[in-house]
Image (tube, grey):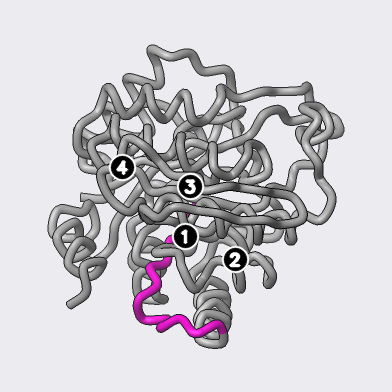
Amino acid sequence: MTTVDAKLSSLLMVSLVSGIRVGVQLPEVEREVRWPEYVAMAQAAEAVGFDSMWAGDHLIYRDAGQPERGPWEAWTLLSALASVTTTIELGPLVACLGFHPPAVIAKMAASVDEVSNGRLILGVGAGWNQPEFTAFDIPFDRRGARFEEAFKIVQTLTSGERCTFLGDFNQVHDAVLLPTPLRSIPLMIGSIGERVLRASLPKVQWWNTWFDWYANNADDFNVLNQRISKIATEVGRDDKTLLRSACLLVVTESSAGERPVPTDYHAATLGNVRQQIIELRDAGADEVILVSDPINEWSIRTLAEVLR
């Protein structure tokens, strides 16, 4: 049994659903949430037995037909959440490697891992929301190439190695994380893009899919999961060592309407969410991250009740 397998096995023994980890996403821009409510939600998620909690990494949303909305800065929020919890794992879902110099992202990740006493899972991605790149003066072009460079730097530093890297977008000269991080920080890639997957799958511990990417159902997840295994094998990764997580949209209060459900698939409900998690487990998921409508303390506690 590998170290990853042993850690996963120990966590599964106390999970809400047998044989699979269950996490929860915290609010981003579904509504305006202030710090005291984040504390209440995080501590509730830990108290009722969720394995992980996640914060989105975005700067602003400007969608046609909707008022502009902005979340709190993800890394500051994660560090604060780490300080008010003790056991639940946490991470960005997922950190855009274009938002900061990659060596600085590694430094921030090490700091959050220190504050949390080794509970960070560093989710990473290339970013997709062009208006926030433009608004905050961040280059949006050649995101695949930029991700490849940034990922190499982040992965090298968070594994405890020094890094010198001279690329087209990043030049790092003998960078090192000091104080020395607690451990090699586990990485998760949140993407279905071929280039990003080929760059990251040889090194990450986790792969994650958003619910839109597999239409929120286990059959489509199984198809996507097989594609991920194929790419992992092609880049030299033993696909059996790659952990898989799936976000699952679940409506816990039908009148909330914080996250409209697309017409081409169905959200889970309180009545069937446990069965859907089991089906995702059987299709190869090692963790399901619940994205609730609404996301609040009541829904977090209610979901835990129906899963037991």
In the rendered image, residue 251, in percent from the top left (x then y), is placed at 50, 43
In the rendered image, residue 14, in percent from the top left (x then y), is placed at 14, 53
Foreground: 40 or 165?
165
Q: Is residue 249 magenta?
A: yes
Q: Which residue is mark 2?
A: 214
Q: Which residues are magenta?
A: 235-251
Query: Of callouts 4 and 2, which one flags the residue occurring earlier in the amino acid sequence?
Result: 4
Q: State how far apart marks 3 and 1 are (Cα).
A: 12 Å
Question: Measuring 60% from the left and 69% from the top, which residue is drawn there?
Answer: 199
Q: Amino acid at mark 4?
A: Pro
Foreground: 72 or 150?
150
Q: State how far apart marks 4 and 1 are (Cα).
A: 28 Å
* Image side of residue 90 versus residue 87, left or right: right
Label 2 secondary element: helix
Q: How many marks?
A: 4
Query: Of callouts 4 and 1, which one flags the residue occurring earlier in the amino acid sequence?
Result: 4
Q: Which residue is mark 1?
A: 246
Q: Which mark is residue 181?
A: 4
Q: Is residue 136 magenta?
A: no
- Relative to 59, is 281 above or below? below
Question: Within 10 Å of the Cα at label 3, are there few (<14), some (14-19), or many (20+) other Cα atoms?
Answer: many
Q: Which residue is mark 3?
A: 250
Question: Measuring 58% from the left and 47% from the top, which residue is drawn there?
Answer: 173
Evaluate if marks 2 and 3 touch, with contact meaning CB atoms under 8 Å apart: no
Q: State how far apart marks 2 and 3 are (Cα).
A: 14 Å
- Could you tell me if residue 272 is visible in this image? no
Q: Amino acid at mark 2?
A: Tyr
